[in-house]
Image: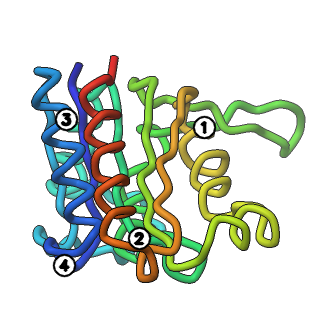
Amino acid sequence: MDILLIFAHPNPKSFCGALKDSFINGVNHNKHSIEVIDLYREKFNPISFGDNEITLEVEKYQQLIKNANCLVFVYPVWWFRAPAILEGWFDRVFTVGFAFDFKKVIGNWGRPIGLLPCDKAIIVNTYGSPALATKYFYMNIPFRRLKRGVLKMCGIKNIKRFNCWSVPFVSDRKRKDYLNKLFRLGSRLR
C-alpha cells in the first residue's frame, strides 16, 4: 500500500508530531511505503485566489495523491477546524478537474463527482476539548465537515478517524496509550 501523510502542525516536537512519528513507525513495521508532506516545514503558501492555478508545487502534490492508496491527515483542531495551512492546501490542491468535477443535473443545477483515485483516508486529530463537548454539543463538526464536505465529495469513501481528546489535560499514560493505538493502526493498515 502507498500512503501519503499530510502533516499540519508548526512544531514537529508537538504531540501531533509524536502521533505522526508513531503512525509512520507502525506503517514501516507493516512494510508499506509512506510519503510525508510537512506543510509547515515545506513553507507551503495556503493562499488561494480561486483561480485553480496548477503551479509546480500543486502539481507535485497532485502527483503524490495520484500515487497513493490512502491519505492520512495529522493535525490539531483549532477553532473547530484544521489549521489555515491545511485548509489552504485543500483549496489549492483539490482543484476542479483533479479532485472533483460537476455533473449537470438540470438547468443551472449540478452535483459534484469525486475524481480522487485513492479509496481510503484516515484523519488524526488532537483536541483541547473533551469528547463529550465536541461530539454532543457541537455535533463533531470538525470531523464531519472534512469527511463529508471535502473527502467524500472528492470520491474517498472509506474514511476513518483517530481523535485524541483533551490533550493539554491528559496524563502521560493516556498520551502513551494514544501513541500505541496509532502505531497499531499503522501496523494493521490493509
Q: Quick one: label 1 or label 3, which is nearer the N terminus?
A: 3
Q: How is the image coloured?
A: rainbow
Circle 2 crowding by C-alpha within 10 Å: few under 14, some 14–19, many from 20: many
Picture coordinates of residue 168, whole percent (x, y): 41, 82
Q: Residue at x 50, y 72 (%)?
A: 127
Spatial separation of the CA atoms under disc 2 and disc 3: 20 Å
Q: Disc 1, disc 4: CB below 8 Å? A: no
Residue depth check, mark 2 versus mark 3: number of the one nearer the observer = 3
Residue under the image location 52 percent in, 31 percent down: 156
Q: Nearer the viewer, mark 4 or mark 3?
A: 3
Residue, disc 3: 26
Amino acid residing under circle 2: Pro
Label 1: element kind:
helix
Location of mark 4 (residue): 11
**Which quarter of the figure has residue 18?**
bottom left
Q: As shown in the figure, which amino acid type bears the numbered disc 4?
A: Asn
Looking at the rendered structure, the kind of residue marked 3 is: Gly
Residue at numbered disc 1 = 152
Circle 1 or circle 3, nearest the eye: 3
Q: Are marks 4 and 3 in contact (CB under 8 Å)?
A: no
